[in-house]
Amino acid sequence: MIRPFIKWAGGKTRALPSLLPHLPKADCLIEPFVGGASVFLATEYRHYVLADINPDLINLYREVTRYPDLVIDAARELFSTNNSPEGYREVRAAFNEQASSTVKFGFEMARIMRAAQFLYLNRHGYNGLCRYNRKTGFNVPFGKYKRVYFPENEIRLFAEKANDTKAIFLCAPFQRSLQAVTAGDVLVYCDPPYLPESKTANFTQYHTEPFTEDSHRQLVQALLEVNRKHGVKVVISNSDTEATRAIYQPFRMHEISVQRSVSTNKDNRQKAKEVIGVLPVCDGCGRYGGGCPDCGAVMGDATYNAMVAAGTFDDLEGDYDFAS
Ligand SMILES: C[S@@+](CC[C@H](N)C(=O)[O-])C[C@H]1O[C@@H](n2cnc3c(N)ncnc32)[C@H](O)[C@@H]1O
């Protein structure tokens, strides 16, 4: 299995053994919240559309896919000379300066350099966090790691897989990336920022905008819409909370426990309860919602049998008056 080459909060690597059996076969996997890309790296779909709202993350994936050698060379230089608080602050300042300069992402070399800096900050910053302040930009403190792993091999494997599958990388909020969904043999897998496990816990913030309960409600509506329009398959994952179960009520939930990342806080070492939600659909038309107006006579066995078992037809039998 190929490991992600960046550290990412909420990465799915530990949950993969429980998650993979719930991902159905399809020609193309669309991930609107790709994050560390562990699901992309662990699956074997023919094509991928990988999206995220974070422009630095998507820039890194694009540049590594197009120019793996150039990103590796630029990043190796940063890794080899800057494992100190001063070196870290310098790279972070250059990164933040570039974001506000007029050059921005205009030139290929600027994009490559930014990708290398982002990788450096990800591996040298505290706990692999990715946090931005509206005014000052990326503001994660130095991680104080004695030795920092340089993930050259993982970068090369990522690039190879992205090129082989002609992966498309989109920087977009989920509403926009879901517009890229069209009819076909498509699976949409969504791993959005998790709903907090308690009222006092914080939302994990990956971007300047928080992902609130309302964002989750909008996501559910958008997913039902793409399933209704195009009959695509939909799977989600989230924390196992009352709010998750209420908001994602159309989904069939499967409980899993996932070992939390190693933490110095011993309270954080327990297993976290998570859910994988699969949108149940009619075998005939592939749509959620019952009634299957579109597939009529070809209603799938599973749906038909479930309706028989639930007694849907019991009161109707014998009602027809053939004489009239
Ligand atoms: C839980 S992480 C995904 C983790 C990923 N499955 C992995 O294995 O690493 C959630 C991701 O959603 C992205 N995100 C946050 N808000 C978003 C939005 N409104 N639209 C699209 N992506 C968003 C974050 O940047 C983050 O990468």
Image (tube, rainbow, N blue to C red):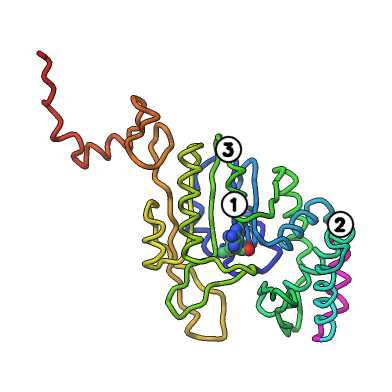
User: What amino acid does circle 1 point to?
Assistant: Glu
* Image height of 220 relative to 92, above or below: above
Q: Which residues are magenta?
A: 69-85
Instruction: Locate residue 253, reporting x and y percent.
Output: 38, 56
Characterize the local packing of mark 2: few (<14), some (14-19) or many (20 or more) Cα atoms within 10 angstroms.
Answer: few
Say what secondary structure mark 1 lies in: strand
Quadrant of the rendered image holding ligand 1: bottom right
Mark 1 or mark 3: whose residue is earlier in sequence: 1
In the image, farthest residue toward the top: 323
Residue where numbered disc 1 is placed: 31
Q: Position of residue 285 (x, y in %)?
A: 42, 33
The three-letter code of the residue at mark 2 reads: Gly
User: Which quarter of the rendered picture does the N terminus lie within?
Assistant: bottom right
Q: Is residue 88 visible?
A: yes
Q: Amino acid at mark 3?
A: Thr
Reading the image, the residue beneath label 3 is 182
Decide if ligand 1 comes within 8 Å of the CB at mark 1: yes
Q: Is residue 208 magenta?
A: no
**In the depicted view, which residue is nearer to us: 242 or 11?**
242
User: Could you tell me which residue is drawn at 80 percent across and 73 percent down?
Assistant: 96
Q: Give how far apart the Cα atoms at labels 1 and 2 are.
A: 26 Å
78 in magenta: yes
| Residue position marked by numbered label 2 in the rendering | 106
